[in-house]
Image: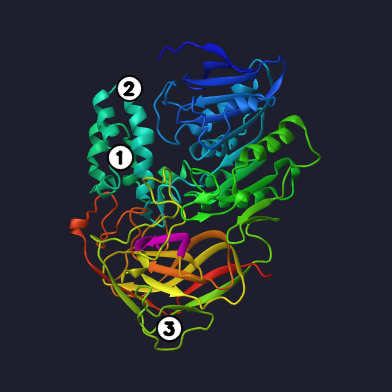
């Protein structure tokens, strides 16, 4: 496409639009370049985004002009096949090499001193890690925010279940609609735009492999590739960040939110790279996690206000990070290794690593008389192991009546996807939700780390899902979610090689409920919800063993589920507790 460069000023900042950069295969990508008006040689900040370089992710960051005024050249580039850039957009596929080529190009720009850093969150955060693995000339540091470690595990799928709400609400308005407009397909654009408010209706589209809106417009063919590749096969491994850890040497400031869809990947990225580089100050890793959604980053999330300390200060943190690595300001890399916002206490705490040293795992055993169904039941969490013969809890899972998602970790618009901390009492009235609570706590319980559920369970179906949710219950009975997890039964042993289950056989399932930092205050209770659906956060398992793209609720089977907690099958919640 023929796009002419043009230049103008924004106050005391000069911006040149649509500056071309030629990638190694000859494709031209275009960027907006912001510079201080004062002549000189400056370090460069690079952001590569599929969401329009003009926007420059200002939904969360300060405008590039803010950074330019502080002595940086700022490059914001449309990724391949998006907006002003040439080529075809296939998510993740070209980002490693394109990021590396762009960094090398930026280091040679007029007015550049040859030192480059990258920034951006979500997809642009992943770009940074993929590009850093290529070790481009000039890359001094990176600042990946709110991003994952793997595009199958924790992004498109979780525990083998399809991340329905996130994927559909990401592709339709943010990827497919701009693509239709870019190629001048007005009919497709109108169809996509007219459905932009059709939520949650779009989540009920079945079978997913025939998704009419996306299939008829042809604007996002990769959606169907993702359904076809429903295991973590070579398609996904070839794109994965975690498969590249041994090649990522750049210092990195990782940051995320406890209610972000990609928080587990953010934590994994930090922990893996920190362990690999140890105490080497040239490859320092830092982690900051606040009580935030994927978007926006602020103190008010869902039904909780986390106080003034939860305000978004990430621009200032980034600037301090960039000033150290690009301007040699400071005697050592800034900040503690790990800074976490501890919910409940509503303040920041510093640690030497993730998970924090000194954390001890407490086992809380699921107990009941066989009637943990709903908050009206007698399910409990006890430090005492169950006795022999304790009866299981039994419920039915009805695919046509899935348990609704009330908040949680998703992306990208809280108006159309289940995000954040919300009241769970409505969900807990359902008899297909098992509810287990601790006694009222006599003293504060500080939980920091990754919560796991060891579940002994059986179903009479060919396949099913098991879901788990950690909840904080206050003195008035208000129940607010902290984190949640899921495992599709056939993926219980491996995401690469699913294996069928035998109906009515008891299996041990290990469910990563999720990572958090929360003080359960004295007078509160810690609660676990167990069920077999969390919709639309995840697709509904129709209990027949059909693949994700093929399954429909109309073909679904009502499944009878049994959760065991006896001496031989001690289902238990593993809770990482930081001692006083």
| Tag of residue 268 | none
Q: Is residue 273 shown to the viewer in this render? A: no
Q: Tell me the residue at 58%/32% (across/down).
A: 62
Residue 416: percent from left, percent from top? 36, 45
Q: Tell me the residue at 45%/45% (across/down).
A: 151
Q: Residues within 10 Å of mark 1 (few under 14, many from 20)?
A: few
| Tag of residue 197 | 1
Query: Residues in magenta?
Result: 479-492
495 vs 180, nearest the viewer: 180
Q: Earlier in the sequence, mark 1 or mark 3?
A: 1
Please, which colouring scheme is shown?
Answer: rainbow
Residue farthest to the front, as pictured: 476
Is residue 409 rendered magenta in the image? no
Q: Nearer the viewer, mark 2 or mark 1?
A: 1
Look at mark 3 in the image and give the residue it sits on: 566
127 vs 429, nearest the viewer: 429
Residue farthest to the left, as pictured: 554
Q: Are marks 1 and 3 in contact (CB under 8 Å)?
A: no
Look at mark 2 in the image and give the residue it sits on: 183
Compute the Cα span from label 1 to label 3: 48 Å
Compute the Cα span from label 2 to label 1: 23 Å
Callout 1: SS? loop
Position of 550 with respect to 24 (left or right) is left
Q: Is residue 396 shown to the viewer in this render? A: yes
Residue 334: percent from left, percent from top? 73, 43
450 versus 277 height, above or below: below
């Amino acid at each position: 496409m023929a796009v002419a460069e043009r230049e103008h000023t924004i106050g005391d900042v000069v911006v040149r639009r649509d500056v071309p950069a030629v990638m190694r295969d000859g494709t031209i990508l275009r960027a907006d370049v912001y510079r201080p008006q004062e002549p000189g040689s400056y370090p460069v900040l690079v952001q590569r985004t599929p969401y329009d370089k003009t926007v420059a992710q200002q939904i969360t960051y300060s405008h590039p002009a803010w950074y330019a005024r502080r002595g940086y050249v700022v490059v914001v580039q449309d990724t391949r096949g998006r907006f002003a850039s040439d080529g075809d957009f296939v998510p993740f596929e070209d980002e490693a090499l394109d990021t590396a080529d762009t960094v090398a190009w930026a280091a040679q720009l007029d007015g550049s001193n040859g030192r480059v850093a990258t920034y951006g969150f979500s997809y642009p955060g992943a770009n940074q890690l993929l590009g850093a693995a290529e070790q481009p000339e000039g890359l001094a540091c990176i600042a990946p925010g709110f991003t994952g470690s793997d595009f199958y595990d924790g992004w498109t799928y979780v525990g083998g279940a399809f991340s329905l709400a996130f994927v559909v609400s990401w592709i339709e308005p943010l990827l497919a609609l701009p693509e239709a407009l870019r190629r001048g397909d007005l009919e497709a654009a109108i169809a996509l735009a007219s459905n932009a408010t059709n939520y949650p209706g779009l989540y009920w589209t079945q079978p997913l492999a025939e998704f009419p809106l996306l299939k008829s417009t042809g604007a996002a063919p990769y959606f169907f590739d993702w359904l076809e590749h429903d295991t973590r096969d070579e398609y996904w491994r070839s794109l994965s960040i975690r498969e590249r850890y041994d090649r990522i040497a750049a210092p990195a400031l990782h940051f995320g939110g406890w209610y972000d869809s990609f928080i587990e990947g953010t934590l994994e990225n930090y922990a893996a790279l920190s362990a690999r580089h140890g105490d080497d100050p040239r490859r320092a890793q830092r982690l900051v996690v606040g009580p935030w959604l994927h978007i926006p980053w602020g103190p008010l999330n869902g039904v909780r206000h986390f106080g003034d300390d939860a305000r978004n200060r990430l621009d200032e943190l980034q600037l301090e990070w960039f000033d150290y690595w690009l301007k040699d300001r400071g005697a050592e890399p800034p900040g503690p290794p790990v800074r976490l916002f501890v919910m409940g206490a509503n303040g920041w705490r510093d640690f030497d690593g993730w998970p924090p040293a000194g954390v001890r795992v407490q086992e809380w055993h699921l107990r009941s008389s066989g009637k943990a169904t709903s908050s009206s039941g007698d399910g409990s969490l006890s430090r005492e192991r169950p006795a022999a013969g304790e009866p299981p809890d039994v419920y039915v899972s009805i695919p046509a009546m899935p348990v609704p998602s009330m908040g949680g970790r998703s992306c990208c618009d809280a108006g159309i996807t289940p995000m954040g901390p919300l009241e769970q009492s409505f969900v807990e009235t359902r008899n297909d939700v098992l509810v287990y609570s601790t006694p009222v706590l006599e003293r504060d319980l500080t939980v920091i780390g990754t919560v796991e559920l060891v579940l002994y369970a059986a179903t009479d179906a060919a396949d099913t899902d098991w879901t788990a949710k950690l909840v904080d219950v206050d003195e008035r009975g208000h129940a607010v979610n902290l984190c949640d997890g899921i495992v599709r039964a056939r993926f219980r042993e491996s995401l690469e090689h699913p294996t069928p289950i035998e109906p009515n056989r008891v299996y041990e399932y290990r469910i990563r409920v999720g990572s958090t930092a929360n003080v359960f205050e004295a007078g509160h209770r810690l609660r676990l919800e167990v069920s077999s659906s969390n919709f639309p956060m995840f697709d509904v398992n129709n209990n027949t063993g059909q693949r994700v793209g093929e399954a429909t609720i109309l073909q679904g089977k009502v499944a009878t589920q049994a959760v065991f907690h006896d001496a031989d099958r001690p289902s238990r919640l593993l809770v990482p507790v930081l001692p006083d």
